[in-house]
Image (tube, rainbow, N blue to C red):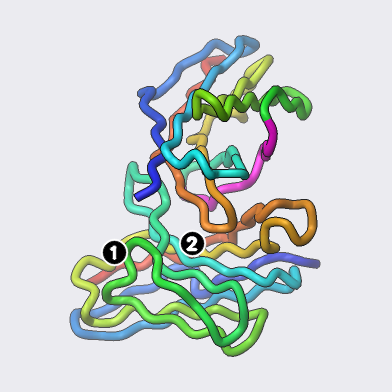
Amino acid sequence: QKEVEQNSGPLSVPEGAIASLNCTYSDRGSQSFFWYRQYSGKSPELIMSIYSNGDKEDGRFTAQLNKASQYVSLLIRDSQPSDSATYLCAVGNNRLAFGKGNQVVVIP
Amino acid sequence: DGGITQSPKYLFRKEGQNVTLSCEQNLNHDAMYWYRQDPGQGLRLIYYSQIVNDFQKGDIAEGYSVSREKKESFPLTVTSAQKNPTAFYLCASSTLAGTSGAEGTQYFGPGTRLTVL
């Protein structure tokens, strides 16, 4: 079974700091990589997608992909209280495997 | 206004009862998916469909059934054979990877929270 690991426990960051989230995956054939944000009691919403090695920036978010090492990361710059949520990593080709998520708490 | 709708938002099931969760999309997406999320857990795939009148089992299909009679609709039935159905159910849809440049990005509906009484 394809696995996606998000091993870090809850992450607390001060407002304005950088939050860094990591994700590793087992299927080397994966072509599509996504980060979703999920607020408590709500459905996941897409915040970043990345398909090729390197960095992709979108506003305060940067996704980094390294297919050789099979990891994808997400950086949140200038963290805001509204960034407090669970972040899900998803990997695959059409059929996606999801990690269990990392909870981020931004402290004002 | 394009999007994915799920109904009902909350659903209560008695023991031995079958219930059906609705999922409709007007995004013209070919693929649709059903996931289950338990507290503190990631999403687990129940069923998915990439074309009308065809669907495949996901990782936890036992006790569930689906149909795909229309491109826009992908209802999920939770049968009495599912022994622990209390969970948050999420429907998603996507284009197929390689067809539009969006590489299979999945978009989610608001979810249905099912509770067994």
Mark 2 Cα shell of 10 Å, populated few (<14), some (14-19), many (≥20): many
Q: Which residues are magenta?
A: A41-52
Q: Is residue A42 magenta-colored?
A: yes
Which quadrant, please, contains the N terminus of chain B? bottom right
Q: Chain of mark 2?
A: B
Count of numbered circles in the view: 2
In the picture, the disc for residue B86 is 1
Foreground pick, B109 / B66:
B66
Compared to A51, does B44 lie above or below?
below
Indicate left or right for B61 with B95 as reference: left
- State the residue at coordinates (67%, 28%): A53
| Mark 1 in CB contact with mark 2 (< 8 angstroms) | no
Within 10 Å of disc 1 (Cα), the crowding (few <14, some 14-19, many 20+) is: some
**Location of residue A31 in the rendering, given as x and y in whole percent from the top left corner:** 61, 44
Q: Nearer the viewer, mark 1 or mark 2?
A: 2
Residue A50 is situated, as x and y percent measured from the top left of the image, at: 68, 36
Left or right of B91, for residue B87:
left
In the image, which disc is placed on residue B90? Answer: 2
